[in-house]
Image (tube, rainbow, N blue to C red):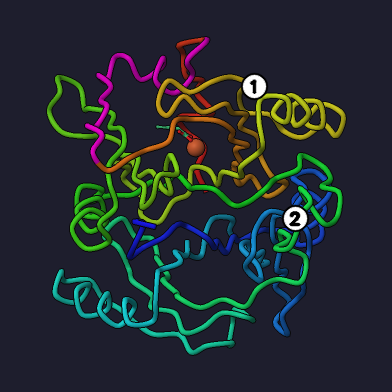
Amino acid sequence: MAITGVLRSALMQLRVLDLEAAVSHYVNIVGLDEVGRTEDGRVLLKGYDEFEHHSFVLRKAEVAGMDFIGFKVESDDFLSDLAVKTEAFGLPIAWVDANTDQPGFGRRLTVQVPTGHRFDFFADVELAEDRPMLRNPDIWQKEPHGMRAQCFDHALLYGPNSTETVRYCKEVLKMAPVEELLAPGGDGIVCTWLTSSNRMHDIAVLEYDQPGKLHHVGFKLEDWNAIGNAADLISINDVSLDAGPMRHGVTRGLTIYFFDPSGNRNETYAGGYAHFPDMPVRQWDFDQAGKGIFYYTRELNDRFLSVVT
Ligand code: M3P
Ligand code: FE
């Protein structure tokens, strides 16, 4: 077991305009399960293949988008050490007490990163009641439903100062850049895909003029057949489609992009190669971005390029 430090992206709190419409979307269509509600009316959800209490939180708000993305780390000692290293790097930190706004979670370190996003880090989370089995495990306890999302997988974050957020991810979080989209002329980097394990990516960070924006939140599906099933459900339920089903050149993932009822973009993601720490970074020239993102059509659509929450 050589994966240490930051283990994976494992929590997101998302703002939605109509709470019950969002719950219906994420439960009935995406296939997450509701595990509880907080006193202030937020809804806690998880994928069937996740051990933790919950991984996805919906909060009713006036403006869609993300409140924060959370990362699970190896230990509470690592969390204390991360706080010191983050302050030394020059970013503001704060602590959230255990079992307060996120039931079942231990204390969290929160960090404002230069792109305007909030990153939370935690070491301890209670196990969910409905979780992967441990003794003579069947493939699931309760039959998955909807798109059969297994887990929250990754998010694409848009904001200014992306070079600094990526530097924090590399130098302090020890995340590895897996692929990069180069700026025109090869002068700088527009987008970096980063992983903390051998999962394809936990986050991608793209340079953008407005801070704290979310391009999409990705959920993992099992395979290409599950992506096909998800595409069927998108049509059957008249879900707003952005693009796909298709493959990415970047990461080789199989994908569909669509919108939740509040306009937050979702991605269903399957496949992709495994990353190992000795692998070199793969790079895309700016004029090949179409192929890198939409491998089959090799052309990006205007909506994909312009809509963020
Ligand atoms: C993905 C992915 C950009 C990239 C999207 C790629 C720049 O969503 O999961 O690899 O929009
Ligand atoms: Fe993605």
Residue for point 39% across, 20% down? 292
Of residues 303 and 117, the one nearer the viewer is: 117
Residue for point 70% across, 68% down? 44
Dividing the image into four equal quarters, which quarter contains ligand 1? top left
Marks 2/1: CA distance?
31 Å
Give percent across and percent down for residue 141: 82, 57
Which of the 4 quarters of the picture holds residue 11? bottom right
Q: Residue furthest front?
A: 136
Marks counted in the figure total 2
Residue for point 31% across, 37% down? 178
Of the two numbered discs 2 and 1 on the same chain, state the one appearing first in sequence: 2
Vertical order, 162 against 283 (above or below): below
Give percent across and percent down for residue 187: 12, 28
- Report helix, strand or loop for mark 1: strand
Q: Would you call the spot at circle 2 few (<14 residues within 10 Å), some (14-19), or many (20 or more)?
A: few
Residue for point 39% across, 85% down? 95
Identify the mark at residue 245; answer none if there is no mark. Answer: 1
Vertical order, 135 against 92 (above or below): above
Identify the mark at residue 137; answer none if there is no mark. Answer: 2
Horizontal side, residue 213 vs residue 207: left or right: right
Which of the 4 quarters of the picture holds residue 2? bottom left
Horizontal side, residue 222 vs residue 63: left or right: right
**Label 2 vs label 1, nearer the camera:** 2
Residue interval drawn in magenta: 278-296
Of residues 124 and 112, the one nearer the viewer is: 124
Look at the image and tell me in which quarter the N terminus lies. Answer: bottom left
Give percent across and percent down for residue 301: 51, 20
